[in-house]
Amino acid sequence: MRRSFDPHREPQADFNLVRQQLQHGYQGPFLLMDSDVLREKVRRFKAALPRVTPHYAVKCNPTQAVLAVLHEEGAGFEIASPAELDACLALGVPAETLYFSNPMRAREAIALAAKAGVQWYVVDSVSELRKVHGIKPDASFYLRLHTSNEGSVSPLSEKFGVFEEEIEAILDEAVKLGADLAGATFHAGSQCLNPDNWRIGIEAAVALFDTMRTRGLKPRLLNLGGGFPVEHRAAIPSIRQIAEIINAALVAVPDDIRIMAEPGRFLVSDAGWLVTRVIGQTVRKGQPWAYLDAGVFNGLLETTTGIEYDMRSDRQGDIVPWVVAGPTCDSMDICTRSQPLPADLTEGDFVYVRNAGAYSNACGSTFNGFALPEVIVV
Ligand SMILES: *Cc1c(COP(=O)(O)O)cnc(C)c1O
């Protein structure tokens, strides 16, 4: 699956905005989001995939001002919870354009979505189909397929997705209930570096649509999920390379099927600089350690899921591998054991984490009394 990735560059947040912000002083870590980049990312996604409507995965960065910019730029939304539903409704997003893509939810959550007017619900089990249909008999459903997550940094097929041999039972149940099972989805895995995962998912969906038609169901929706990668330290396949493979596979999808995707990371990661500061440094067993005021619990959780951030500083020293840790007393709070940073990094220095707009604040807590980075959208 190793292919040579093209060197096509994505936009990144303007570092001058960080400098300007720091002129007002520093009260603690902050996540600076550049709205020009958010806009540009939506445009690039649409340009590369003209048949595909992006519905942003709100969980990735639910900051209201971020959602507002994406909404203005014409992105739709994918939700997983009542709080995400409320965030979208507060922006004036019409409920019928929302996709409830969490395959297992509480009854109360379904009832709230149904009351608000959400029409589309993902399912990957007979029980969930019955549950949602029981609450909202006129709901429309899309089936989440289990597909390959090979070559993605954070596999998402572990928890959800119906296996081939279980599809039959769900189709039977939909026909029996008279439920509008009318679509297919899959998730290629987050930070997916293997574009074939989308091709495989699309092929599985096309085959499913044929089976659906023979049962009298009326397929109308293909949802390509998320997973579109962003660059940190290593090269990635560009959106154009991925789109070439997706667009070729979409030729087999009839025109009467609406095609959407749920990019999360791709739309917001590049727009953010996470600014942190070194609170202390030492040497242990010959290796330098830097302790930052943001760590695994308050902004850098994804360092523990395989993301290798590009961290920068104002120092000019030789680049050496540092252990980077967060401010809490939990030994889990070690971000990385080989972060390239200048040898002369010291207490009080800023560490700037590039392309950190995705799953940073969104996954954080205030564990041990350390605040989450302030989110500043400019
Ligand atoms: C998390 C998630 C996404 C977004 O994934 P990214 O890898 O950030 O693009 C999309 N769809 C669903 C159902 C998800 O759970």
Image (cartoon, rainbow, N blue to C red):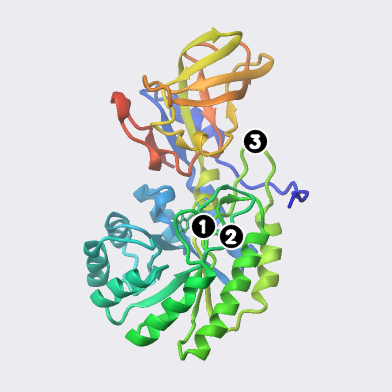
Residue 103 % position (x, y):
39, 63
Q: Residues within 10 Å of mark 2 (few under 14, many from 20)?
A: many
Q: Which mark is residue 365?
A: none
Q: Quadrant of residue 200?
A: bottom right
Q: Secondary structure at mark 3?
A: loop
Q: Which mark is residue 263?
A: 1
Sooner in the amino-acid sequence: mark 3 or mark 1:
3
Residue 313 % position (x, y):
57, 22
Residue 345 % position (x, y):
57, 14
Q: Is residue 68 above or below residue 93?
A: above
Q: Residues within 10 Å of mark 1 (few under 14, many from 20)?
A: many
Q: Amino acid at mark 2?
A: Phe
Q: Residues within 10 Å of mark 3 (few under 14, many from 20)?
A: few
Q: Amino acid at mark 3?
A: Arg
Sooner in the amino-acid sequence: mark 1 or mark 2:
2
Q: Quadrant of residue 52?
A: bottom right
Q: How many marks?
A: 3
**To which residue does mark 2 refer?**
45
Q: Amino acid at mark 1?
A: Pro
Sooner in the amino-acid sequence: mark 2 or mark 3:
2
**Real-space Cα distance between discs 2 and 3?**
22 Å
Disc 1 and disc 2 in contact, CB within 8 angstroms: yes
Say if disc 1 is inside 8 Å of ligand 1: yes
- Tell which of 309 and 171 is nearer to you: 171
**To which residue does mark 3 refer?**
233
